[in-house]
Structures are given as C-alpha cells and as structure tokens.
Amino acid sequence: MRLVSLLPAATDIVAELGLLPDLVGRTHECDWPPGEIEHVPVVTDSEIDQNRMGSREISDAVGGATHGGSSLYILDTARLAALRPDVVLTQDLCEVCAVSYQRVSDAVRVLHGAVRVLSLEPRTLPEVLSTIGRVGTELGVPAAAENLVARLRTRLADVRRSVADRPRPRVATIEWLDPIWPAGHWVPDQIEAAGGTPLLAGSGEHTRPLDWSAVLAARPEVLLLLPCGFPPERTLAELHLLTERPGWADLPAVRAGRVWVLDGPAHYNRPGPRVVRGVEILAHVLHDLPTDVRPTEARRLTSTDHAHRTV
C-alpha cells in the first residue's frame, strides 16, 4: 500500500501504527518522528514565508483579500501523481491549516487508478482517539490501532486519577498571539483531563479571534501559550505581542508566575496520538506533578522572558 499524508497529524498516526514504510509522500510540515520522516518526498509548500512574517502579517495573509481564509498550501499535483498513491490522508476541518479538501479531491480525480481519500475531522479528544481507530481499520491494521488506542486511554485514565482530588485552576489557552485566538476543538478536553477548568472556549468549539478584554475579564489562574505551527522559541520571540498589552501584568496567571510556553505543533495543534502526551504535560504544568517533562515541552515564563523581544 502506498500512502500520502497531507496532514501532519495523519503522519503521526501512520507512524504510530507502524506504517511509515508505506508512506511515499508527506507535507512540508510533517516533522515527526525525527530521523525517520525526512527521506519521504514532500508534495506541498506554503504560499507565504512565515519565517519572515510576524503573527499579525500571517493572520492578515490568511484572512485578507489574497487568500480569503483559504488554504495557504500549494499541492504539487505532478509529484503526487508520480508517487502513485493508493490512499491519500487529508482533512476537511480547517481550510487554513492544511491543503484544502476540495483541492485534494480535485487532484485525486485526475490520477490514474483507484485512489481512496480519507478525510480526518476530529473535533474533540474522544474523536481524536476514534479517528486513530478508523485510520487503522481503513489501512488494514485494526489490531494495531486497537492496541494503540487502548494504551492512550490507559495513559489518560492515569492522568485523570492522579489529579482527581486536586483543585482545578482556571486555564486560558492562546493559540495565536495577534490577533488573540483561543484554542478550541480538543484542547479544552486536554485541559479538563489534566485537572483544569478551560476558559474562552469549550470542547469541540471552532473558535474565532477575541478582543484582549475577554482574556482580562476571564482572569485566568494559568495562561498557556501554544500558537499553531510555532515552536516554543518562535513564541518566545513574539511574546511582546502579549506582554505589551494593557493589563497584562495584572492577570492572576502573570502575578502568580503561571504563564507557560508549550510546544503547540507537537502536542496541541495536531489531532494525533501525541495529544495524550500533551495532557500529561498539562498535568505537570497545572499541578506540578513529578514527571519526565522536558524544558522543550513546557517552559514557565520568567521575569527575563517578560522583557521586550522581537522576531
């Protein structure tokens, strides 16, 4: 079987199911597992250079007249055809976060042979787990998927048990810095599973930008920063977009020193198996549980980090 993944979360699932040898194509953002994915041909690119643009510029490009909120990703249809896929994994949940489903469908229609398109659209944490099971069944490895999901459910149950009797802090999660965009979909479920009370968005919610006043009014006791597609060092470089806003220093989370930068792409932005690791990290962040969380996975802001930074 020849697989092409047009969604980083799908690539994560393929890897966990032991199907990387069948993966013949991927996106330019598929970066896990490191050391095992780099040789797979890339069939997408971005229409904008995010490394040269700030959060506001990227947001304007996504929602402005140029793109109108459509996908920012280019699909190399010639390379896709040359790879002769049997199955293409994609999504229809967010037109910005990946190649649009319609574009993929149009490309597949002109390919020779029967090509299946699997669209993954989980919105909640339970749906992420059920999607893993569905992918395993569709790709002919249902037992591997069942075992993987069972292990993930056990890990989630362990976290829930460890935080069951602890106070549940009020948690605000920011998925984009300018404009302010709260994290929805499965992230509120992750917070709940880790023993927190999610603010600004509910389970499964497809969010929209918020005015900064909404964050101030929510008075979060913990503030999590995990911008979509940004590694922690990029988030730290744009931290001034928050720290220079009026009222920042008066937020309960800031006053208590409970502002954290997390690795969004690894554990929160992508609906794949690693969201469970995200829950384990959150249990450490919210309740200081002794775990093997690495500094690259969760970093508490210090007074030095609050100093002015620019990209």
Image (spheres, grey):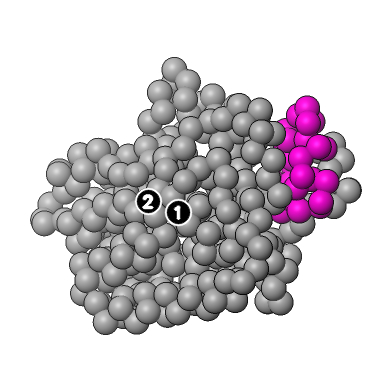
Q: Amino acid at mark 1?
A: Trp
Image quarter of the C terminus: top right
Is any atom of residue 64 visible in this view?
Answer: yes
Direction from residue 166 to residue 65 in the image, left or right? left
176 vs 35: above or below:
above
Q: Residue at the location (32% across, 39% down)?
A: 100
306 vs 48: above or below:
below
Residue 218 lies within the magenta run:
no
The disc, 2 or 1, on the residue closer to the chain's N-terminal end is 2
Direction from residue 64 to residue 194 in the image, left or right? right
Residue 189 percent coordinates (x, y): 48, 57
Q: Secondary structure at mark 1?
A: loop
Residue 31 percent coordinates (x, y): 51, 60
- Spot the residue most to the top: 65
**Magenta span:** 233-261
Q: Residues within 10 Å of mark 1 (few under 14, many from 20)?
A: many
Residue nearest the viewer, comparing 237 with 112 = 237
Q: Residue at the location (69% across, 66% down)?
A: 287
**Residue at mark 2 to residue at mark 1: CA–CA distance:** 6 Å
Direction from residue 56 to residue 288 in the image, left or right? right
Residue nearest the viewer, comparing 92 with 221 = 221
Q: Secondary structure at mark 2?
A: loop
Please give the label number shown on residue 147: none
Q: Residue at the location (46% across, 37% down)?
A: 207
**Residue beneath disc 2:** 123
Please give the label number shown on residue 186: 1
Image quarter of the N terminus: bottom left
